[in-house]
Image (cartoon, rainbow, N blue to C red):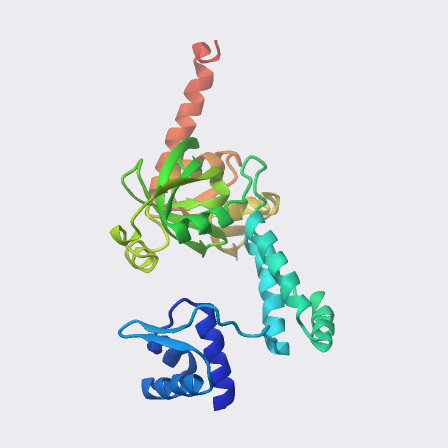
Amino acid sequence: MNRIDRLSAILIQLQGKKVVRAAEIAERFDISLRTVYRDVRALQEAGVPVGAEAGTGYYLVEGYHLPPVMFSREEAAALLTGEKLMANLSDHSNRKEFSNAMQKIKAVLRGSEKDFLESLEDNIAVVSRRRPVAEEFPNRFLSDIQYSLGKQQILQLDYFALHNETLTKRDVEPIGIIFMSGYWYLIAWCRLRHGYRNFRMDRIKNVSVSAETYDRTRHITLREYIDKYGEYDTPLFEVKVRFPAALSRRIGEQKFHYGLVEERTVGECTEMTFMAPCLEWFGRWLLTWGAAPEIVAPLELMEKMQLLATEIKQHYLDPRSHS
């Protein structure tokens, strides 16, 4: 990148944030701090009102705005790809907002770039294997959660926990959102459980943003949470089960809902590997397939299945259980 292009890009970066540290600029353009200081001085000499706070960073003086930004063909294609990803991997609220933003972006593109995007439109696809969200879970709260994060306001959730299939009310202090294993999760301090928890967003039945605020500095950062707890705040069990080939076809998309991470052909069977947060929850699903599945591991799941089978047997042997 030549210097003129870099100065323009630095100016756009300054307009995008309230304060930008010199180290951020240096990292983005792979230049030294000395070069950053020279570039900022060049912008100031050109009449751009760049202010500086010692030990903090640079900022544009209030009231200064760049003319409308023009996008290159490559940038426009990247934005189109982002729109395709958002349409499949986000919730209803963010999908709508991103679509509105893309309409505004397309409105300022040159005619040749608009034609270029139209030619790409039908040739980019994102295929998601996620199961559709049940109607009772609206899956439209990502924008509200982002708002509460930005404003540091308490969220009140109606949350359905899969492991015990119960709906509870939670007041939480959000620390971040992450996308993993095909789902969005809210990471937050739960006042009910007095600890950090992750909440799968497609299991949230309702959300309201409270007027009450919280102090984010009292909590660990999202990065610290991920480093400390990994992807989950409860241990996962690696489960291996072999299904007859005909049955594995009938299972269809259900396997993704129960944590499928790998499948391979073993003789006339399909061996599936799952990462399950709760063996009882997984075992109750496995019971629906009768005696056909063969449990390879772990031994604890076999013991759990024996208990569940005994429970069902006793239920139907005892006439009083039907009264």
The quarter holding residue 101 reads bottom right
Q: Residue furthest bottom?
A: 2
60 or 163, nearer to the observer = 60
Left or right side of 59 for 96: right
Q: Determine the residue positioned at 38% across, 79% down.
A: 27
Q: Position of residue 4 (x, y in %)?
A: 50, 88
- Whether residue 239 is visible, yes or no, is no
Q: Residue at x 47, y 18 (%)?
A: 316
The x, y position of residue 144, in whole percent, is: 48, 46
Is 223 drawn above or below residue 322 in the view shown? Answer: below
| Residue toward you, 47 or 126 | 47
Badge count: 0
Q: Image height check: is 156 above or below 124?
A: above
Q: Depth check: 247 or 114 in front?
A: 114
Q: Is residue 127 above or below residue 313?
A: below
Residue 209 position, x and y percent, is: 43, 41
Q: Percent from the top left, x then y, of residue 121? A: 70, 66
- For the residue pair 271 and 60, the one nearer the viewer reads as 60
Examine the rendering and report whether any part of residue 115 can be seen.
yes
Q: Residue at x 61, y 76 (%)?
A: 70
Residue at 33%, 73% in the rendered image: 57
- Tell me if 256 is positioned left or right of 189 in this view: right
